[in-house]
Amino acid sequence: MFLNYLKITLRTLIKYKGYASINLLGLSLGLTAGVLILVYVLDELSYDRFHTNGDRIYRVGTDMYDIKTGALNGGIEGNGWAVGKLLERDFPEVEKVVYISNGNGLQVNHNGKRIEQRNFFAGQEFFDIFSFPLVKGNSQTALAQPNSIVITESMEEKYFPGEDALGKAMLFEDSLLFTVTGVLKDIPAQSHMQFDMLISFATYESLARGFTYDGGWGNLNVRNYILLKEGVDAHAFFAKARDLYMNYVEEDMRKWGMFMYLGFEPVKEIYLHSKRGNGMGQLGSIDRVYLVSGVALFVVLLACINFINLSTARSAHRAKEVGLRKVVGSSRNYLITQFISESFVLTVLAFLIALGLIGVILPMFNQLIGKTYSLAMLLQPAVVIGVMAMLVVVTLLSGYYPAIAISSLRPAEVLKGKIMTGQRGVQLRRVLVVFQFVISAGLILCTLVVMNQLNFMQNRDLGFNRNEVLIVDVGKVPSGDQTYHNAFRNDLSALSAIESISFSNAVPGRNGWVGQWAHASDRSSEESIGTEFMTIDEHYFNTLDIKLLAGRNFDPNNTADMQEGLIINETAVKQFGWETPENALGKKVDSPSKHPAGTVIGVVKDYHQWGLQQQIYPQAMAYKPHFSRYFVLRYNVAATADLLTQLEATWKKHYDGHDFSYFFLDADFERQYYAEQRLVKVFTVFSIVTIIIAIIGLTGLVSFMVTARTKEIGIRKVLGADVLNITRLLSREFLMLVIIANVIAFPVAWYLTSQWLNGFAYKVTIGASLFVLTFVLAIGTTLLTVGYQTVRAALSDPVDSLRYE
């Protein structure tokens, strides 16, 4: 029986190869999008699922609340030094706690060079909690002693090629000698932790100034992960442990002007759901997963709708075939099975074409979403199951209605030439076309809004000049004191292309010390505000063209400036309660952490330290060049032919053995808009695909309509109707359907894009021009598609039209 269905199906596809080709095009485009997004979604959802105890592992973070308003000021992934030990001591629900801290870019000495690898300090409990298998060494002791280091297999091959690294020494920062005590498998890509090396936390204890497990409440620079005991009610534990800060240091927090509480995140949810950041790797976004999944689902649905419309349109050609089959004894169930079989074969053929398309466009898709997928991903069990389910669903969605509709034709009426013209079928096809253009118009409008916002962010006046600025990073070079870099700076000044040089610990797009609490000295500490504290020199404002509104710049000859001088921005003036820049001059600022504390000597105009997603923070800048890491160079474009070569030669003269690290400020600042740039590309690609599929679907419906009205067209031409009248008559209905689709799509797209824009502190308004442009694109596409076929019908010979039926 199956072979019979298959034989008839193949004959039918060959007979109607034009329709089959169009169907295959639409379905293959839809399946290509569907399969690629299926791979992406399954990959995103698989992060941190490999840990044996994953259901009991939680990351402990810190949430900070304003004392007066109770509003959440922000959350971070770090904790005070005492937190982890107190969780283990005070709460029997906790089985294990591990301390982890950044390696601060410790560099490996190798072959006369310093190489930075991703490294972290981690306690000996690390391997008890996480399932990162060691291939060499003892997991119970590998991180127990000071100066111990565990490296990945890739690092063993890099630094000890062909050798066993166990027991070997590795030199860091010219003076730190570590012993390799373990080798672990390379970290899976689907882990929110990405590292090359783990250094024992006992080493951190000896290196971190003043480290103690009994204090350090304000030093939120360590991470704690906990393993709860089996059977523990996690939410009940969270409620008990949340107030740990309040139980121990409430009075200190009042001085800081904030309350802090613990927050707990399941390890399986960190990658997609965390709002506290991730200093151990990148984060994904569950919203992005939902967005891309939704768009891909619509694309697949549009492909199915396109199939339905084309199959329905083809029913006019197959009506007599159905009538004859019924006359010779075929049952309705047999015909339904036959048509669904055709749908299945077409779907499988479309899938095979989609595989070819995937092989071609996979590199572009990887670039689009920032992944490194290979075709081997398609062989993973979850992907195979997902693809099979997709094929079944697409087959049923695209084949069931045409099968029911065509198999319901009555033989007597069919053989007399009366094809399906019932209102029910016509209305359904109209609804499907409207749905297609709702999606298409909605995606076009969304794309235009996202493009408009991105253009706004890229071209807004940021309050500083980011063009022709190059940053040299000396943060990995031990500085000792400011004089260490003076010789390098003097040689840079001698280069003809350099117009101005500054030295700072932060530049726009790269943070200084964020979240430093401070308050006006004549106000209560409970009125503290979070500031971004930076250290700069006297050339910083001139180099970046930042405007000084009141007061003066730093004076290197004034000792008081280095000791207590502060320059703040307009936002800090307002939040400290001083109203105007002039009123702020001479005022004193206090801070529990001593930074920023001092006397205001100047006020600068607000500028965007960060992208337009964020409000401008209160900023406080101190004259402390010896705390800095970035040389900020403004250069003359006309004299930059050999600038990088000259800079690197100067670097090697002073810092030979250290990697020359630099970046251009404009390109680096643009990194903050990477997500928006990628979103524009995703929306653009999917908009084009949906428009193509909608055009194919519209072609099918126009074809059906022209076929059904062939005799009417002939009669109208005989009675004197010209081509324009007939084209207008046949196009009117479709233009009305597209107008209805736009009316439905616009409010939905406006709401969704408005919600998206609410994530930006500075944003565009959704102007009428975007709606007009979307409408014009939708109408223009419809006129071109419908006009081509209707003009062909209108130009046909009326004699042939009258003979048609």
Image: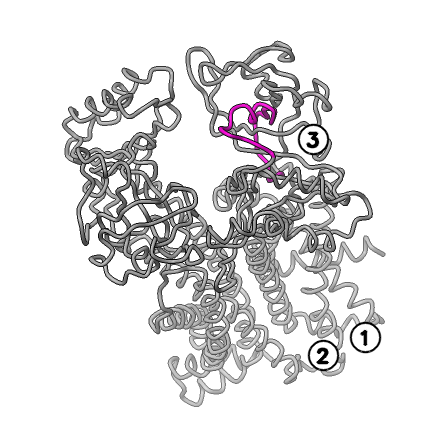
In the rendered structure, does residue 498 fall within the stretch colored magenta? no
What residue is rendered at 71% in x and 33% in y? 131
- Tell me the tag on residue 418: none
Disc 2: which residue: 415
What residue is rendered at 18% in x and 31% in y? 498
**Badge 1 amino acid:** Val
* Secondary structure category for the residue under label 2: helix
User: Hey, which quadrant is residue 427 in on the image?
Assistant: bottom right
Q: Position of residue 257 (x, y in %)?
A: 46, 54
Give 554 or 642, whichever is nearer the viewer: 554
One can see residue 621 in this view: yes
Residue reaching furthest to the bottom: 719
Answer few, some or many: residues within 10 Å of disc 2's Cα (few below 14, many 20 plus, some between 14 and 19): some
What residue is rendered at 66% in x and 58% in y? 13
Q: How is the image coloured?
A: one colour
Horizontal side, residue 324 vs residue 300: left or right: right
Q: Position of residue 326 (x, y in %)?
A: 80, 73
- Dot placed on the residue nearer the N-terminal end, 3 or 2: 3
> Disc 1 vs disc 2: Cβ atoms closer than 8 Å?
yes
- Tell me the tag on residue 125: 3
**Badge 2 amino acid:** Leu
What residue is rendered at 19% in x and 23% in y? 490
Q: CA distance from mark 1 to mark 2?
A: 10 Å
Horizontal side, residue 113 vs residue 665: left or right: right
Vertical order, 545 against 194 (above or below): below
Disc 1: which residue: 327
Q: Nearer the viewer, mark 1 or mark 3?
A: 3
**Badge 3 amino acid:** Glu
* Secondary structure category for the residue under label 3: loop
The stretch of residues the image draws in magenta is: 190-213
